[in-house]
Image: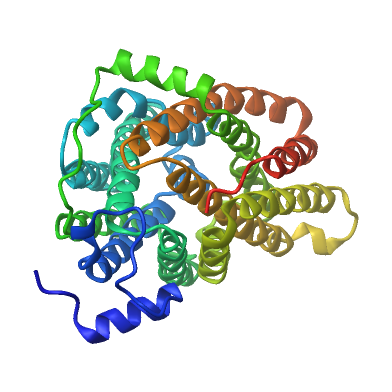
Amino acid sequence: MAGPNISQARVFEWLTGDEDSRLCADIPEQACAEQPRNFFLHLWASLGNKLADELSSARLVLPWLMGIIGAPIWMVGLLVPIRESGALLPQIFVAGFIRLKPKRKGVWVLGALFQALAAFALAVLAFVGSGSLGGAAVLAVLVLLSLARGLSSIASKDVMGKTIAKRRRGALMGWSGSIAGGATLAAGGVLMLLGNQPGNLALAVLLSVAAFSWLLNALCVARIKEVPGAVEGGESAWDSIKLGLSLLKKDRTFLHFNVARALLLSSALALPYIALLGQQQSGSDLGGLGLLVVVSGLAAMVASPVWGKLADQSSRRVMRNAAIGTVTCCLLGAGLAWLPGTWTQSVWPYALVYALLVIVHHGVRLGRKTYIVDMASQDDRALYVALSNTLTGLLMLVVGGVIGGLAQWLGSAALLLLLALTAAGAVLSALKLPEVE
């Protein structure tokens, strides 16, 4: 099999910080020669996925869609829990099915195609949706999108673990986040320019771009050279659950990781409430949405490569530092809401804190993703990822509902103080995790 061309190998070495693109660790020998080519296919696939995620964000874009079609407020509160838990909860039920396949990229492609279909459906709803019926249709499509996202999530980590060597995965995720951040930045700038245009048209275009981004993801994934892997250990959903629960009892590191990950949910849960505080100052015009999309994209573009390289050195320290950042951002967001002065009555200070929290949240995501991929062996990686994601999805449903109720009672600012306290617990939990790199 022919190796990668010289220029591709050199760019690969530059992006990963290695001097020899042929060095491999914990991937099959046959996959070593294809690693530079696969790296770039992963990079473009991740660009499509991350850009689509941002342009259909349940934290920013979909609430604007619900507002434009006149959906009830209580439906808006269901967007983030459905998006997150729908992608995570079913994963343990498909882990055994995926492990029966020697090549898993087909599952990833299928998930990307269903997400593209869902995004196109949301674009149509921007024109034809109205009131409670339109809101219910958005939630139903979001369920489909989230389930498809779960398929892609578990398969993508498994394929990456087979095709990209240890100590290069964090760099891959970091650079993909940076490129996607730049593309998101451009999309947010366009939204700011279209602030006075009809909202349904702008959102339909935005969601259509998300759909095409998932099609790009599917195309790149289909071209990845994946070496057939072991198929031993594929079980039914119930067998996977029993095996997963036994792993929680036997593998203390895995149990401790899931505790830390649960506490780190505070970064994801805080983002919509800081955005909500900003939205209260800017109204529902697309210029305010565009600003938040711009700062989110800029933050991702700057932060992701740094977090990625740091994660390859110590994903545990990345999780700890991101938890400290979450505490800081939650306190800043709450403080802004209570400070006097006209300068706090603008969307800009909230956008700044939102950008800082996006930077921190990328650290949380890159840290935990790199940690679990490096912690698990090739044979058990899919099950570890699926079980961890299912547990997190269950927590997201329960905690998301409780947080929503508390926000209605306490207000967004007071809730951020509670999330800061949760993030402080994540700092202590991450400190006790062992190194896996």
**Left or right: 419 in relation to 136:** right
Q: Which color scheme is applied?
A: rainbow
Residue 314 in view (yes/no) = yes
**Residue that appears at 55% across and 31% down:** 77
98 w.r.t. 171: above or below: above
Task: Give percent across and percent down for residue 278.
Answer: 67, 53
**Left or right: 275 in relation to 213:** right
**Left or right: 347 in relation to 272:** right
Q: Nearer the viewer, residue 367 or 365?
A: 367
**Residue that appears at 55% across and 56% down:** 362
Q: Nearer the viewer, residue 185 or 63?
A: 185
| Extreme residue in the right direction | 340
Residue 296 in view (yes/no) = no
Q: Quadrant of the N terminus?
A: bottom left
333 w.r.t. 17: above or below: above
| Extreme residue in the left direction | 1
Q: Nearer the viewer, residue 43 or 128?
A: 43
Task: Give percent across and percent down for residue 117.
Answer: 21, 44
**Residue that appears at 80% across and 36% down:** 414
Task: Give percent across and percent down for residue 154.
Answer: 33, 39
Q: For residue 213, which quarter of the picture?
A: bottom left
42 w.r.t. 53: above or below: below
Task: Give percent across and percent down for residue 156.
Answer: 31, 47
